[in-house]
Image (spheres, grey):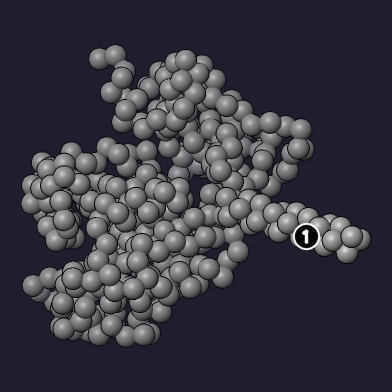
Amino acid sequence: MKTNKLLIFVSFILVLTLSSFIASDLQTAKNKFVVVLDAGHGGKDPGNLGNGYKEKDIALKTVLAVGKELEKHPDIKVVYTRKTDVFIDLFVRGKIANKEKADLFVSIHCDSHTSQAYGAGTFVLGTHRNKTNFEVAKKENSVIFMEDDYEKNYAGFDPNSPESVMSILLSQEEYLDQSIQLASLIQKKFTSQLNRKDRKVKQAGFIVLHQTVMPSVLVELGFLTNKIEGAYLNSSKGQTQMANAIKEAILQYKESLETNVSHYQIGENNVSITPSNASNLVFKVQIAASSKALETKPYNFKGLSNISRVKVGGLYKYFYGNTSNYENIRVLEREAKSNGYKSSFIVAFKDGKKIALSEALKSLPK
């Protein structure tokens, strides 16, 4: 009898211990910075085949190399849209990132051209500034024709139509500044560390970026159709070097978010501030995000007052200003940027819930 009681007691302790470990692991996972890495193409879609190289293979090997390095950081969670040679629909890639509530989405590809063009470029979602940008996006978007039910999944989107591409751009508007910041860091690493020809940060209508609701970039590592660059990107050395540059840019981006706020800690008795005027449409300027809960005092935010804080998952997001007037919030955004918050951007709340900026603007009186 005593033995049975002892066994029951030991079992009870083991269950409690295991439960605490699981809870701790779940909490740790929530607090991690989530990066979704997307290797372009795959399976029945080889991508471009410049000089006999396969874009899908080079993209995958580079993505896995980036992920391997990022996974060495315990505060980062890496998610892959594919880790093998399989075909993944473009809209599914975005769904993976959205389900994970990712902090970043990075899609990796290789370019091609009829000439011996070369160099690395990074794209964010936006209007086509020239015909070349449209052609790059059209090439990457054409993969939807390989997907089942593409007309249903993309609501009649036509990658060959500039007008159709223009219609998808507003969804990423509120993340554009951050996307450009990450893209610029990637380009700087490519050019300063690896001496790659700089094809700049550009905007184009990539479907895979449109599907995501977080800062997102698409990297064109270089041109497989260029004999020298194609051989470099197909080599283990080239893939490792490009992957390290992307990894370092991601780490620098993450650090910039965290250092946008000072390192003063506050006591546990302070509570998060929820958006006020919950029944109205409210605009704020998001200036920073951090795992640290900071007192919303001017000395913590470069002299700015009227700061609010909201906890989202494992991060605290910090906002400057609170107004229902869009023109006023644009003034505050410029002020935040001039005070050093270069990556700040406008967000909207309605009935206490965050909504897309494009949706908020539609509801404003004409």
Tell me the SS state at disc 1: helix
Query: Residue placed at 49% from the left, 55% from the top?
Result: 34
Query: Residue placed at 41% from the left, 73% from the top?
Result: 64
- Which one is nearer the viewer's eye here, 161 or 84? 84
Horizontal and vertical percent for residue 250? 46, 61
For the C terminus, which image quadrant?
Answer: top left
Q: Say above or below: 64 vs 103.
A: below
- Which one is nearer the viewer's eye here, 176 or 194? 176
Q: Relative to residue 197, is residue 131 drawn left or right?
A: left
Q: What residue type is labelled 1?
A: Ser
- Which one is nearer the viewer's eye here, 352 or 27? 27
Q: Say above or below: 280 vs 247.
A: above
Horizontal and vertical percent for residue 1? 89, 60
* Rendered image quadrant of residue 265: top right
- Which one is nearer the viewer's eye here, 298 or 208? 208
Query: Residue placed at 39% from the left, 52% from the top?
Result: 97
Check the image and name the residue furthest to the right: 2
Q: Relative to residue 213, is residue 57 drawn left or right?
A: left
Horizontal and vertical percent for residue 72? 56, 70
- How crowded pointer 1 is (Cα within 10 Å; few <14, some 14-19, many 20+) is rated as few
Horizontal and vertical percent for residue 145? 12, 57
The answer, for residue 170, to whether it is visible in the render is yes
The answer, for residue 225, to whether it is visible in the render is no
Q: Say above or below: 158 vs 38.
A: above
Q: Determine which residue is flagged by label 1.
A: 11
Q: Relative to residue 210, is residue 32 drawn left or right?
A: right
Check the image and name the residue furthest to the front: 1
